Structures are given as C-alpha cells and as structure tokens.
Image (spheres, helix red, strand yellow):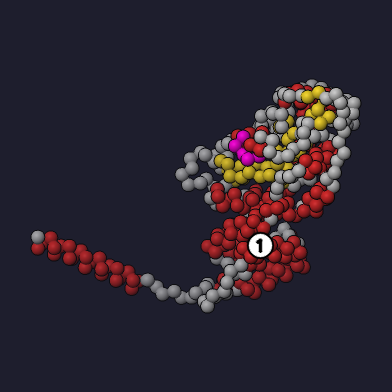
C-alpha cells in the first residue's frame, strides 16, 4: 500500500512540474492589436473616398443607397466602445459585408482591405446579413389582395404576352463547401454541393417569395412540394383571383397560374411545357415558346442578382445555415435596388376585367394547357412566335 501511495505521489508531482514549466514557456502578449489592424480608422476614410469619387461600384451601392441601408441596419449592428479599444463602427461593418457580397472574396483577403482580422469578419458578416434581412423584410413579400395579383398578371401579359400569370417559379443551386458529416445530402445532379434557392418572381425581375436551405440533392419540384408557397396555393390561401375568361367572345374561364419548367408537376395552378419535341408551327411548340419566354424572367432575376452580388458565383466556405443568411441578404438587397420598379407596380394596380355569361369551366390542368395553346394560335397570337 505504501509503495502504491508513493508511486501516485510521484506522478502527481511530475504532473504539477510539467504544468509549471508549461506556464513558464508561454510568451507574454506583445501587443493588444497587430500593427496591420491599427490602421483601420485611416483606411476607412480612404475607402469611403473611393466610394464617393472614384469607384462607386466598390460596394455595388451608391453613396445615397449606402446611407439609406446604414440608417436601417444601424440599430441592429452598432457596438459600444470599451475602455480598452474603440468598437468597429456600424459603417465599417456594413461596408465589409457589402464588399463580401459584391465579390465573394475570402475573409483573409478582406482583412487586408479593411484592416480587420478575419476572425472578427467571420462574426460581422452573418450578423450584418441578418440585420439586412430584418430591416428590408417588406421588400420580399407576396401580393395580399386580388388587385395586387391582377397587377402582376397585367405586367406579364403586357411585357411577356402570357395572360393570367401570377409569377414565374424556378430553383437555383448555391454552391457551398461540403458540410461536415453530411454525406451526399447536399450533393446535387450537377456534381457539386449546394443548397437550393426556390424563388417566385414577377414580370419586373422582383422576388415575391423565396425558400432557401433545402439540400442540393432535392429537385426543384421536391423543394416546391415541401414549401409554404405550395401549401398556400393548394389551399387557396393567397387571395388569387377566381378563374376568368381571357377575352370576349370566349366563354371559358381560365385560372390564374404560375409558370414553371419541366422540373415541376403540371397542376391547375402551375403550368409547365408540353413534353417532347414538336413540329415547328404546331400549337404545342408555340405554347412552349410562349411559356418559356414568360418564364425566363426568373432566370433573368437570378442572373442579375448573381452579376451584382458575385458571392453567389463562388463556393461559400460556410455552414448551410450561414449560407442561407447570406443568400437571403442578397435577395433583399436585389429588391431594394429595384424598388422603383416595385413602386411603379404597386401604384398601377387597377385592371378592368370582363365577365361573360354563360360560363364554362375547365377543371383539369391538361385541358387548361390545351386551351391556352389554341388561344396562342388564334386571338392571342404574336407576329414572331412561329419563328422558334
């Protein structure tokens, strides 16, 4: 027993000595802040000089737009100074975030631009993006009344020659680094890891609804089937106008529909192209052309947003949750930059509709598609449709 106690005592003494020697080897901190980051204040003045007078596209926003956004998000991101150091200002935080969204640069690259450590930047960007979404939450929302939906439909008919359309639907894969221990959940058919951005867009390239975060392996149709938008559409909870005739002398009532590609299932509320290859000049081919012409606004909206905020073109070295916050911020900023189009759309929201009796109803999605294809061949035709 005494021998065992002696061995334990020796081991404890050795462990204590190792801890003491380890503490002696630890170097004292040389400085509170590295010289690179001490130049942050002077560097900020130079950055805003560039924004004002030389390169206004540095943050993808004009000075007036930047100040407007800053006013909205400042209450959410402002930090207090301490006795040890001054806090990074709200303008600096917003500028760092906007530059990241505009370029998709790594945090290591941004730290040399803004003289802020990459560890601090990794906490600033998600926080500011979340504040942008909260401040601009009214920029992305579905119409609430029948007149608002009719305004959307009027824009589609006047600009893209497809009547009774209340939006174009599609999905976009956002490239991310493979999440830890995720297997193939985020691996899509394009052979990279992603989350899916599902969006409903109006005729003016504005996002009305977005759903982000689904694993890349899930198809666009699968994401839509599990979305809140699908549930509300199927349960008639969106105040979409009732079916109406297209024009006199028609008596058949056609419902208002969403346009999608072949990744989605045909339904009463969602029109998709005819499958297969059809001869030139046939009603099926003309219908597919007219539908694709109107549906491409959602593709255009994705392209405009990705060109403005190039973080969407790079691989995000982030968790799916953080990547979702980043993408939501770009969507809201996209709509903010197009707010003039939003105001024009909402101001002109009155449409005269024709009623005609007796009425005939179409109940099946395939019959609705056939009726529209015939309509495009007769009264609803346009001069150039048979060229494609």
Q: Is residue 165 magenta?
A: no
Residue extending furthest toward the front: 358
Identify the residue under disc 1: 73
Q: Residues within 10 Å of mark 1 (few under 14, many from 20)?
A: many
Query: Which percent across, then down, holds residue 19?
Result: 29, 68
Magenta stretch in the rendered image:
225-230
Query: Which percent across, then down, holds residue 31?
Result: 48, 75
Quadrant of the snapshot with the N terminus: bottom left
| Mark 1 secondary-structure assignment | helix
In-image side of 25 versus 358 (left or right) = left
Residue name at image x 81 percent, y 31 percent:
244
Residue 152 versus residue 378 in the image, above or below: below
In-image side of 1 versus 360 (left or right) = left
114 or 217: nearer the viewer: 217
Residue name at image x 75 percent, y 65 percent:
63
In-image side of 337 versus 353 (left or right) = left
Residue 38 versus residue 176 in the image, above or below: below
Based on the displayed image, in which of its 4 quarters is residue 303 positioned? top right
36 or 324: nearer the viewer: 324
Query: Which percent across, then down, holds residue 304?
Result: 73, 48
Res. 17 in view: yes
Residue 235 versus residue 358 in the image, above or below: below
């Amino acid at each position: 027993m005494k021998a065992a106690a002696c061995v334990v005592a020796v081991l404890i003494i050795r462990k204590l000595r190792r801890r003491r020697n380890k503490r002696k080897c630890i170097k004292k901190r040389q400085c509170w802040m590295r010289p690179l980051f001490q130049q942050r204040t002077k560097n900020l003045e130079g950055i805003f000089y560039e924004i004002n007078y030389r390169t206004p596209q540095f943050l993808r926003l004009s000075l007036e737009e930047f100040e407007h956004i800053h006013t909205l998000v400042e209450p959410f991101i402002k930090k207090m100074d301490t006795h040890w150091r001054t806090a990074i200002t709200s303008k600096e935080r917003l500028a760092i975030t906007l530059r990241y969204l505009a370029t998709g640069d790594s945090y290591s690259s941004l730290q040399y631009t803004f003289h802020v450590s990459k560890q601090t930047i990794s906490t600033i960007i998600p926080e500011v993006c979340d504040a942008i979404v909260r401040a601009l939450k009214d920029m992305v929302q579905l119409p609430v009344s029948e007149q608002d939906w009719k305004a959307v439909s009027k824009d589609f008919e006047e600009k893209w020659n497809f009547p009774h359309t209340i939006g174009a639907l599609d999905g976009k894969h956002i490239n991310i680094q493979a999440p830890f221990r995720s297997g193939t959940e985020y691996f899509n058919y394009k052979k990279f890891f992603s989350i899916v951005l599902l969006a409903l867009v109006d005729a003016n390239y504005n996002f009305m609804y977005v759903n982000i975060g689904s694993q890349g392996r899930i198809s666009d149709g699968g994401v839509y089937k599990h979305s809140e938008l699908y549930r509300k559409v199927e349960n008639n909870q969106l105040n979409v106008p009732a079916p109406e005739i297209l024009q006199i002398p028609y008596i058949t009532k056609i419902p208002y529909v969403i346009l999608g590609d072949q990744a989605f299932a045909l339904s009463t509320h969602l029109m998709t192209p005819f499958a297969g290859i059809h001869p030139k000049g046939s009603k099926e081919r003309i219908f597919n052309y007219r539908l694709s012409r109107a549906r491409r606004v959602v593709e255009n909206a994705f392209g405009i947003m990705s060109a403005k905020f190039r973080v969407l073109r790079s691989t995000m070295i982030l968790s799916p949750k953080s990547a979702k916050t980043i993408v939501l911020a770009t969507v809201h900023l996209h709509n903010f930059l197009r707010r003039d189009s939003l105001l024009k759309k909402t101001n002109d929201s009155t449409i005269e509709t024709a009623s005609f009796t007796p009425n005939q109803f179409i109940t099946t999605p395939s019959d609705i598609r056939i009726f529209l294809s015939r309509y495009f061949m007769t009264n609803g035709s346009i001069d150039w449709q048979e060229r494609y």
